[in-house]
């Protein structure tokens, strides 16, 4: 089992909500992926100014969990 590193994102509302019922959330994600019902959520857009000004588009936390699972799955192939 691999651990997903949160890189200082533990305090965000989406992470806290996911972690609150992590087992249920993972089972739900698995069922959605296996049935083909999974739909990615809306991205959050914001700008940062360090080291230069740029626009960031961040996926919801549950989608990042799926991204990590996909990378792990593809790296085994």
Image: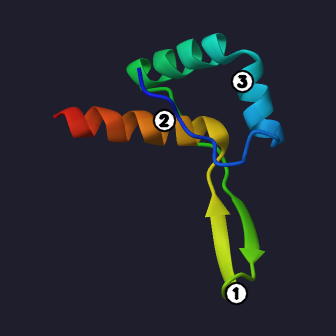
Residue 55 place in picture, x, y as percent: 67, 77
State the residue at coordinates (66%, 85%): 51
Determine whether label 1 and label 3 are within 8 Å by CB.
Answer: no
State the residue at coordinates (55%, 42%): 64
How packed is label 2: few (under 14 Cα within 10 Å), some, or many (20 or more)? some
How packed is label 1: few (under 14 Cα within 10 Å), some, or many (20 or more)? few
**Residue to which mark 3 is pinned:** 19
State the residue at coordinates (41%, 33%): 69
* Residue 32 shown left or right of residue 42 in the figure: left
* Residue 21 shown left or right of residue 68 in the figure: right
Please state which of the two labelled residues, at mark 1 or mark 2, is closer to the viewer: 1
Q: Quadrant of residue 71?
A: top left
Please tell me which of labels 1 and 2 falls first in the chain.
1
* Residue 47 shown left or right of residue 43 in the figure: right
Please tell me which of labels 3 and 2 falls first in the chain.
3
Question: Is residue 1 depicted above or below 76 in this figure?
Answer: above
Per the rendering, the mark at residue 66 is 2
Label 3's element?
helix
- Cα distance between the residues tagged 1 and 3: 32 Å
Determine whether label 3 and label 2 are within 8 Å by CB.
Answer: no
Q: Quadrant of residue 72?
A: top left
Q: Quadrant of residue 28?
A: top right
- Cα distance between the residues tagged 3 and 2: 15 Å
Viewer can see residue 39: no
**Residue to which mark 1 is pinned:** 53
């Amino acid at each position: 089992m691999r651990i997903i590193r949160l890189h200082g994102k533990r305090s965000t509302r989406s992470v806290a909500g996911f972690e609150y019922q992590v087992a249920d959330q993972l089972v739900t994600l698995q069922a959605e992926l296996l049935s083909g019902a999974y739909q990615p959520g809306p991205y959050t857009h914001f700008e940062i100014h360090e080291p230069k000004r740029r626009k960031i588009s961040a996926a919801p936390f549950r989608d990042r969990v799926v991204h990590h699972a996909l990378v792990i799955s593809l790296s085994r192939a």
